[in-house]
Amino acid sequence: MWWFSSPKIVFGSDSLEFLESLKGRALIVTDENLVKAGVVERVLERLRTAEVEYEIYDRVEPDPSFEIVMEGVSVAKSFKPDIIIGVGGGSSLDTAKGIRAIYENPDVDPEEISPWTELEEKGTKLILIPTASGSGSEGSNAIVLTKKEENRKIASIHPYIMADYAIVDPEMVKDLPLRVAVFTGLDALSHAMDAFVSSWKNDFTDGLCIQACKLLFRYLPRACKDRSDLEAVEKVHNASTIAGIAIGSSQAGLSHTLGHSLGSIFHIPHGFACGIALPYTTKFYSKFVLEQYEELAYHLGINEKGEKAVDELVAKVKNLLVEIGSPTNYRDLFKELGIPESEFYDKLDNLVENASYDNTILTLVEAPNDEEVRKLFTYAFEGKDVDF
Ligand SMILES: [Fe+2]
């Protein structure tokens, strides 16, 4: 037995209007930069029109911790919302999901949530409004939180975690800085490609993965060049949610095994950590899922079979990285971010160890051993073609 679920999705321009139909008390979960930038104000205007009483919890940070969720739960306990509205990127949306889950189930330890944990629905609605096009958190039943003292991320999934509504409004992302559009878009692509080759892949998600990949390969370059290209911005925003729904049922995979580990140690943007891994993880993992990559390649216009199809798919991903101005290896990313190269090699043992604990390794068709993970990290760092 397995399940597929999705929030109700309100999409397209002016979908924020949906907020005007709400009643009751709303707790907004966001970060202070979005409040300062006036992005949250677009949501508040609609709530005021609806005469919804609201409170803002804006202490969400990148790579949110369990502590941030618990602090938000305390705010919820005193404010007693009927609705929790997450506004932001994956960090704010994941935090909002965590707050709703623990606000309604105070005896549950958020670190222990698995698909088999008993979680009760007590009627607090969860609405998620993404302000970036990448995490897909608004469409998934997953929460990724950081365990600070161990410097690692823990991903929890559960059907109950799914939002009641996702509002996928391109207006909320049209002012996204171009650099953010690049790495968030790569996160979406990593979800779609990972989920298509997961051991949990299924008939309900395969089409979503293919469509998300098609949209991203076609529109991401445009959306990363000019945010006033509203057609491209909207298509990428939709693709991100579509890929998010797919990972909710199929799970992310090997690009995320590397990406989570690299991100938790070096605190680099998640989308870069995963997206740059894709050419390397795709080639390595193709020995286990050749047919699936052949099928994906076919849908992306590649008329080759076997390893040739994989090689063209890998080349297509690399071309996309170049086209949108992303580094194609971790070394160049480190250079851009001012992280000394030596730190990568100093932390390589930790990177491999963290990867071996990552939840995403559990849903691979075959998990790489530690030596293979070490090689994958090294090849992705040095930009070498995978030959093992
Ligand atoms: Fe991701």
Image: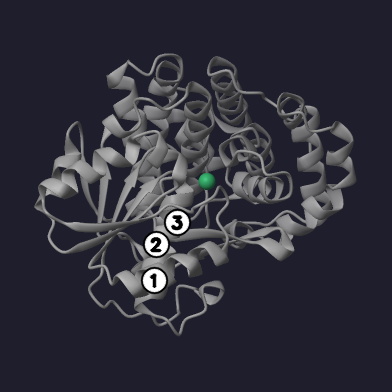
| Secondary element type, mark 2 | helix
- For the C terminus, the image quarter is top right
Residue at mark 1: 101
Residues at marks 2 and 3, CA–CA distance in whole angstroms: 5 Å
Q: Residue 94 carries which label?
A: 3
Report the front residue among 51 and 311: 51
Residue at mark 2: 97
Residue at x 26% of width, y 36% of height? 169
- For the N terminus, the image quarter is bottom left
Q: Callout 2, which amino acid?
A: Lys
Image-based side of 112 in relation to 46, left or right: right
Residue at x 58% of width, y 60% of height? 65
| Secondary element type, mark 1 | helix
Residue at x 28% of width, y 31% of height? 170
Residue 268 on image: x %, y %: 66, 39
Report the front residue among 171 and 326: 171
| Secondary element type, mark 3 | helix
Q: Which of the 4 image quarters holds residue 354?
A: bottom right
Q: Are marks 1 and 2 in contact (CB under 8 Å)?
A: yes
**251 is higher (above) or lower (below) than 211:** below
- Residue with the most extreme bottom position: 107
Q: Callout 1, which amino acid?
A: Ala
Q: Residues within 10 Å of mark 3 (few under 14, many from 20)?
A: many
Q: Earlier in the sequence, mark 1 or mark 3?
A: 3
Report the front residue among 182 and 248: 182
Q: Are marks 2 and 3 in contact (CB under 8 Å)?
A: yes
